[in-house]
Image (cartoon, rainbow, N blue to C red):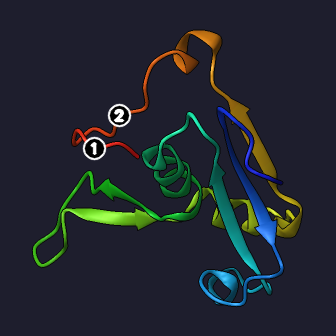
Amino acid sequence: MAQRKNTLSMRWSKALEHGHSRKFGVFGDLVYEWGEGCRKADGALLHARTACERQVPNVVVKPGELPWTWEPSFVEELIARGYDITTIKFSIKKTESATNVPAVEPDGGNG
């Protein structure tokens, strides 16, 4: 998947040998791409929502326990349900109205 203008995408790549390949138990890794008009922060958001575990609050905290717990990532949930993660592909385009707005990072820098 080549970088396309105003498009955010995610796919599996067997070319990568490091990273989540050991975590997901399959050779390769997820690749996130954002074309011209998209921000680096958009790629980080997609990564955080798909490959990172989620921290959630504990409803009842017993003495000595932490007030939160960790839930599996979206990708880990898919694997647990029997999906072949090496076939994952995702892309989304910005709307026409959003493509006319300059991409500015939340901290004020350009991404």
Residue type at the position of mark 2: Val
Q: Nearer the viewer, residue 71 or 49?
A: 49
Residue 109 image label: 1
Residue at position x 80%, y 53% from top? 2
Q: Secondary structure at mark 1?
A: loop
Count residues near mark 1 (Cα–Cα under 10 Å), then give few for <14, some for 14-19, many for 20+: few
Residue 19 vs 40, above or below: the answer is below
Residue 96 vs 75, above or below: the answer is above
Q: Read off the residue under disc 2.
A: 104
Distance in Å between CA atoms under marks 1 and 2:
6 Å
In the displayed image of the protein, which residue is found farthest to the top? 97
Q: Position of residue 11 (x, y in %)?
A: 77, 59
Quadrant (top left, top right, bottom left, bottom right) of the N terminus: bottom right
Q: Secondary structure at mark 2?
A: loop
Q: Position of residue 24 (x, y in %)?
A: 69, 80
- The answer to whether the residues at label 1 and label 2 have Cβ atoms under 8 Å apart is yes
Residue 37: image quadrant is: top right
Q: Is residue 81 left or right of residue 58?
A: right
User: First in sequence: mark 1 or mark 2?
Assistant: 2
Residue type at the position of mark 1: Gly
Residue at position x 57%, y 63% from top? 51
Residue at position x 80%, y 87% from top? 27
